[in-house]
Image: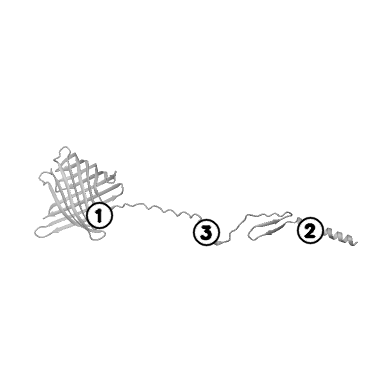
Amino acid sequence: MKLIKIMMAAGFSSAFACNLLAQTSTVTVTNFVTVTVTNFVTVTVTNIVTVTNFAAKAEVVAKSPAAPAPKKLAVPVRNPWQSSVSAGLTLVRGNTDTTLFSADFLTEKKTPSNEYKLGVSGAYGAENSQETVNNYKAFAQWDRFVTERFYGFLRTEGLRDYIADVDYRLTIGPGAGYYLLKGTNNTLAVEAGVNFEAQELGGLDQNFATVRLAERFEHKFNDRARLWQNVEIFPQVDKVDNYVVNFEIGVEAAISKTLSLKTCLDDSYANRPAAAHLKNDAKIIAGVAYKF
């Protein structure tokens, strides 16, 4: 009987041991490496590694490519119109009664490829109640640059001079020009072109072709003072002794950002004037100019 109990206890122990060996035991390590033990010892690594070091994370972020900076929008280059209005007045009272008034408007715009100019002027004078000056003129010119210095242009001019008996004189035509000097303080340009001219001189209408030869110079002493000089000649193509020469020279000095003083000599010479009129008309004009 005792032997039977011992054999039964041994059987239960063997069954329990076999059952224990048949179970799978799992041991998990905190670094996410899992070890699995079965009847035959097998080690399986889950291949999961988590970095909890914040310094390492910062280094990884620092090595990652930075996001591209946002592109700045290009600011368009502005080339505004530059304009000025000037006026002058001379009054003489006493032995003579003299009045001379003049005014002009000039505007221009310059771009890398084009230049635009527009001007209007007029003068009126009287001495002892008799008119001595009464003229008005205007011009417009467009320059188209082919190179930095060479350009083609289209120009038109108009004149009305009651004292010289010019009811009207209109010229229009193309041409070409070249800057001999084109610096910050000095510019010198020469121009040549052909024109169609229509005028009424001394009550007689005339239409003919002319050649226009011109020269323009400007010198800036500094950003507050400048000197300029222009000359142009219009000989008739088939009668070269019939020509007109316009000449101008002047100085300007700024007294503020918008105001300046101007003095210029304006001379016009017509080799074939109206009957009973002189060939040359000259006047000196002094005034104040406002820039905007």
Point 69% across, 59% down: residue: 27
Instruction: Depth check: give the residue in front, 292 or 256.
Output: 256
Q: Amino acid at mark 3?
A: Glu
Cα distance in 3D space between marks 3 and 2: 53 Å
At x 19% / y 41%, what residue is drawn? Answer: 211
Within the image, what quadrant is residue 291 found in?
bottom left
Q: Nearer the viewer, residue 23 or 10?
A: 10
Q: Residues within 10 Å of mark 1 (few under 14, many from 20)?
A: some
Would you place residue 78 above or below residue 146 in this image?
below
Nearer to us in this view, 227 or 143: 227
**Amino acid residing under circle 1:** Ser
As helix, strand or loop, the secondary structure at mark 3 comes to: helix
Can you tell which mark lies on residue 139?
none
Residue type for callout 2: Ala
Q: Disc 1 and disc 2: Cα gap in Å? A: 114 Å
**Residue nearest the observer in this picture, 147 or 212:** 147
Tell me: 145 left or right of 46.
left
Which residue of the protein is positioned furthest toward the top in this rendering? 238
Mark 1 / mark 2, whichever is N-terminal: 2
Q: Position of residue 261 (x, y in %)?
A: 21, 58
- In the rendered image, which quarter contains the N terminus? bottom right
| Residue, disc 1 | 84
Please name the residue shown 19% across and 55% down the image: 251
Local secondary structure at mark 1:
strand
Q: Residue at x 13, y 54 (%)?
A: 126
Spot occupied by residue 101 in the image (x, y as percentages of width and height): 17, 55
The image shows residue 284 at horizontal and vertical percentages of: 15, 54
Residue 59: mark: 3
Mark 3 and mark 1: span between their CA atoms? 64 Å
Residue topped by disc 2: 17
